[in-house]
Amino acid sequence: MLLIRCPYCEAERPEVEFTYAGEAHIARPADPSALSDEEWRDFLFIRTNPRGRHFERWRHMHGCGRFFNAVRDTVTDKFAMTYKAGTPRPSDEEIALAVSASSAATPAEEARP
Amino acid sequence: MSNFRIAGKGRVNRSRQVRFSFDGVDYTGCEGDTLASALLANGVHLVGRSFKYHRPRGILSAGSEEPNALVGSNRGNGRFEPNTRATVLEVFEGLKTESQNRWPSLTRDIGAVNDALYMLFSAGFYYKTFMWPKSFWDKVYEPVIRNAAGLGKAPTAPDPDVYASRFAHCDVLVVGGGAAGLAAALEAGRSGASVILCDEQSEIGGSLLSEPTAEINGQLAWDWLEDTNAALAAMPNVTVLPRTTAIGYYHQNFVGLCQRLTDHLSIVPDGAPRERMWKVRAKQVVLAQGAIEKPLVFAGNDRPGVMLAGAARTYLNRYGVKVGNRVVIVTSHDSAWHAAFDLAKAGVEVAAIVDVRGTVPTQLVAAADALRIKTLIGWTITGTKGRLRVSSVRVNPVTTGGKVGGAETIACDALLMSGGWTPSIHLFSHTQGSLTWNEDGQMFLPGRGKEECRLAGAGKGRFGLKAAFEDGAAAGAAAAADAGFTAQPASYHVEGELSFTGVTGRELPTDRDPGHAKAFVDFQNDVMAKDIRLAVREGFKSIEHIKRYTTNGMATDQGKTSNINGLAVASDALKRPIPAVGLTTFRPPYTPTSFGTFAGYNKGELFEVTRKTPIDGWAAENGAVFEPVSLWRRAWYFPQVGEDMHAAVARECKAVRSSLGMFDASTLGKIEIVGPDAAEFMNRMYTNAWTKLAPGRCRYGLLLGEDGFIRDDGVIGRLSHDRFHVTTTTGGAARVLNMMEDYLQTEWPDLKVWLTSTTEQWSVIALQGPNARKLIEPFVEGIDLSEGAFPHMAVATGKIFGVPTRLFRVSFTGELGFEINVPARYGRAVWEKLFEAGQRFGITPYGTETMHVLRAEKGYIIVGQDTDGTLTPDDAGLSWAVGKTKPDFVGKRSLSRPDMLVPNRKQLVGLLTSDPKTVLEEGAQIVLDPNQPVPMDMVGHVTSSYWSAELGRSIALAVIQGGRSLQGQTVHVPMPDKVHAATITGMVFVDPENTRLSA
Ligand SMILES: [Zn+2]
């Protein structure tokens, strides 16, 4: 079970308090009627589905109830950072900074036979 | 029965004898015995038949890695478990056990014919042998295989036991209570860190329990162990959990521990949990799981009496049991020599030590000579004999050129083998930690980890006691330091170390045809070396594919004793080095774990929450039959004496249509939407227009997803310009609120709107029927109920029976109706008052079934029953509920996508069967031409279907391609009895002019 940091509660909480809410930074178009069928299809269904760094939304369902964004690696499941809804997509530098600041796992020592 | 217990040896309690049975024969063991040690003490090696070939099998190991000795264990009172490992099961007074996979008896087993037919059962036999003819699969092959294969029989009675679970947090979790784990726990404990130490065995100590003569810091091992256990017990910050297996290692140092609490007791205290799942979140983890000995791969290595040398040593030193009277050792590793020495010193005749290596440490040979043990260095083993127990072995010299010389036969009653040791890296592997191949030790070792985790001791390839202690101490101290404590690892002085060099893992050379050698790699799944070679010949290259094709390592032991041997055989066949062939992935649980442990408290009534309305108690007292609706239990119908469901529902329906019914609608989802922008928010969320809805009026609201499909519906009342009382479907309440919150928080955070779930704040009583107004008029204060002042779809606040109410004039039946919302705590009282006052109208409580019939008679849809997530408002005949002039709402853009506008979309229509007595099955498929060839072209399905007492016939709703344009046409509904004809109609069957709504 993952530990997830809620950026509103400013606390790490177990995964069972949260629900996943899909990919982040997909804003609903201000005027959907202005979109072509293809553009609307892309908004509805087309997602990046990356292997690796994924920007995604979570809701602190059984906590403060807020939706927020997260950067998670889909291979390792590891969260790089979480941030409030409405804040822009963090840059590579910001993500790297967040990873180094967090108490990321210290790798086990290399095996010495 | 012969007694193989040796005086003065072992840790079992000789003064506490326990009686148990195996296959109906009574035996005596000692407190502290496992079933395996107790059977061996009685001279019993044969304990089961193998999975595929039904070959006689004995006890291979002395631990949880056991692949062979699986038994059915009966702990009484319906407590039966199949596939219990005899090497783990602790004996107690009255334990009943039985062998598996044999018929009619263990010694005479008809299934053993498979052994003679072994060529049929080679690698991939499932995929090849039974492919033809196709019709044989269901009727012949599958049942026969199912009957013949498989291991134990599943219990048929419900599990009577209770299971516990708990969360725990600690600074340092130490997995494994052997030398390394104990040293780690000591360091972490002394530092003041909170520590959990768990070990799967009944006693803490690991290999120390088999090393009574080793000296640690000047103390004999068992004295040191006793003092250490006492020291740990005295530390309030340390929790020691024996009989507790770390079964899985998950993200962020979350480790599942299965603690066995009562399986070893002859009398289980009432209500005591059998097992407890610990869900531990640890700041630091030390894995000290030790190593597992590998069998050697040679013909006949699976015969009862053939056993791992380390296991034989454990049975001798820990349990005081000799595994035979005349033993032969075959090994590629030093450690087996110590088993020979210990057995010889205990008076067992050691017929020979066969070492497949060309050279052996001289001190071992000297020690063997001193004990007058014959040594055959550079020899191989090429066969064993003995039907139900090994009686002799066939050994041959091997020249330096690799030529196998003439065979020699040595009589024995036990053969002890060792192919070296495999570090237990399973839990580390669960964390996706990388593994590196160690060529010298021929073993995989932990590489880079992904968690805050250290490994120590033999589990990391550091063999020997001193190495284990010091590695463990270093890991424990470092883990404590990383958790914020200060620790200085102690050093250890050890006397009496075993020698730990050896080579590993190749099928042994033979002078016979290896293509016919029954040289087993995976004992539990009956996989032989030649099966793996066959898989390679047939083109399999990846070990993951070879594993699945041969099933090597796929049994319940997950290949603990077979993976590396299988890999070595595959590596030889592929002519590629082992690291290039790769290792299969280990997955939780580490050892087989009961379903009960995973379920924990979540069984029976606690399986999931049962939500009950404030009126539920009244319904129960008045004979309601209940049905589950999402998490709620709802009154389904109220049968009177002698009534079945059909009769009760017909009576309830008639009462509503003719006079008055009452219905508990409290489960309806309710959301209060409040704020200056409430109407704007409603406009954006729902399809309908809300701006012009006057306070005091209601509207049917339809909610879509952005894809344009119906998600939910409900009546929504506007209480004031900035306050809406939204109702949702019973099952949709949480989902709708989540969706609303999502849009409000992330798309339109500028809107000044607040959302509150009020589902459980209100009790809702639906009063439906022509006499509804007459009943409540005298009891309502502050609301003019006259038709002109309070028409259909009106809402007002006032009082009823002196209780505050939000009164809705709404109908889900087509009759004059009210939905009386009162604060939940008054729900039952108001219900009872209405029931009492309503007697003069013959008021009839009704349940969800009648509600369904009445709404279907009116063509009112149930979202999720008549819709399935693919219906647009137009598909459902609800275009009138869409505010077409609104610039936008959730889902609007999708309604103009081309595929939403095609004419043959499935549309909701009514269906009347040609035979009025036929009630169609909900979900039944619909075809236009019943005589077309199979597979038929299915144009839709029945969504709702009931008997209508009002009409004296059946009615149904259905979705049919282009259905609205097919009005009056006949369609056909194939059902199990026959194909039924039905006519497509409109959806409203009763009172299409809605005259009754305003009666
Ligand atoms: Zn929060």
Image: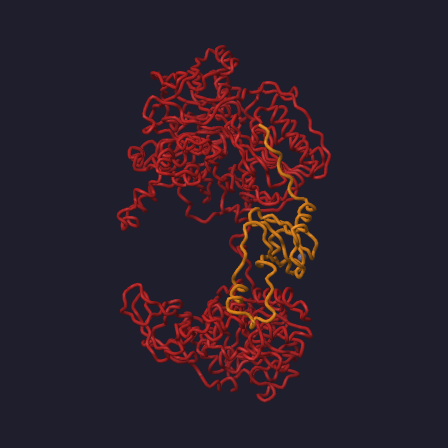
Q: Is residue B826 visible?
A: yes
Q: Report x, y in % for residue B692.
A: 61, 82
Quick one: which residue is furthest to the right in this view? B486
Split into quadrants, the picture shows ligand 1 in the one at: bottom right
Q: How is the image coloured?
A: by chain
Which image quarter holds the N terminus of chain B? top left
Looking at this view, is B921 or B315 the one in front?
B921
Give the number of marks. Answer: 0
Q: Looking at the picture, tell me which residue is in the foreground, B742 or B724.
A: B742
Q: In the image, what residue occupies the spot 53% across and 41% down?
A: B268
Q: Is B404 positioned to the left or the right of B714 in the image?
A: left
Which percent across, then down, holds residue B871?
47, 70
**Left or right of residue B319, residue B489 in this image:** right
For chain A, what colour was chosen?
orange
- Which chain corresponds to the colour red? B
Judge by depth and name the residue closer to the eye, B185 or B894: B894
Q: Position of residue B405 (x, y in %)?
A: 35, 16
